[in-house]
Image (tube, grey):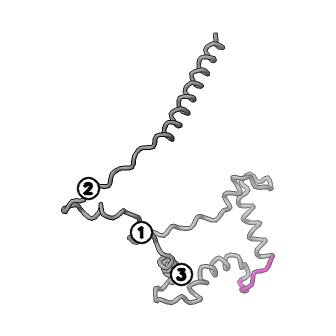
Amino acid sequence: MWRYLAGAVAGLLLLTGVFFLWQGRAADRDPLPSAPPPAKSAGSPSLYRQPLSAPEASPKNREEKRFSRADKDKDGKIEAAELLDPRRKAFAKLDANGDGALAFNEWAVKTIEKIQGADRDRNGWLSPAEYASTAPPPPKKARCGC
């Protein structure tokens, strides 16, 4: 009994597939004619005369935005301190003894502490979920000044 029912369902699926293939070929052979241009009248708005397109940001605008993000005090100049301050904070976290130089031992201690903090089950290795917890947070998206 189940074999007959499965055979009937398979046959219906096969016929449905053939129907869709046939309809797809019919659409390829008989393309629709193009739409006629809109009638222009003296009182029609200018929207119909020119095609609409989205404005694109020019590379100069992108570069100006990048410059603006780096210019922290907004004086029109980027000084070395403006570029280096965020990096100094990250470096200071790794420089344990504060001598201004990062030794391998200082880096290794911070890395081992990070791994041990992520190893929740204390088995000595990181699972994919534990390793994912060591990723830096995603950067904050700049809010639109629109």
SS type, badge 1: loop
- In screen coordinates, is 112 left or right of 89? right
User: Is 12 displayed left or right of 126 in the figure?
Assistant: left
Q: Quadrant of the C terminus?
A: bottom left
Q: How many marks can you see?
A: 3
At horizontal 50% and vertical 40% (from top left) the residue drawn is 29
Q: Residue at x 75, y 61 (%)?
A: 116
Query: Closer to the N terminus: mark 2 or mark 3?
Result: 2
Q: Position of residue 77 (x, y in %)?
A: 51, 90
Looking at numbered disc 3 in the image, what kind of residue is underneath it?
Ala
**Neighbourhood count class around disc 2 (C-alpha, 10 Å): few under 14, some 14–19, many 20 upward:** few
Q: Please report whichever mark, 2 or 1, sits nearer to the chain's N-terminal start.
A: 2
Identify which residue, 27 or 64, lies in the foreground: 27
Q: Amino acid at mark 2?
A: Ala
Q: Which residue is mark 2?
A: 39
Q: Can you identify the residue that label 3 sits on? A: 70
- Asked if disc 2 and disc 3 are in contact, CB closer than 8 Å, the reply is no
* Res. 5 image quadrant: top right
10 Å neighbourhood of mark 1: few (<14), some, or many (≥20)?
few
In the picture, the disc for residue 55 is 1
Question: Magenta stretch?
Answer: 98-104
In the foreground, 141 or 61:
61
Q: Is residue 27 magenta?
A: no
Q: Is residue 113 above or below residue 24?
A: below
Q: Residues within 10 Å of mark 3 (few under 14, many from 20)?
A: some
Looking at the rendered structure, the kind of residue marked 1 is Pro
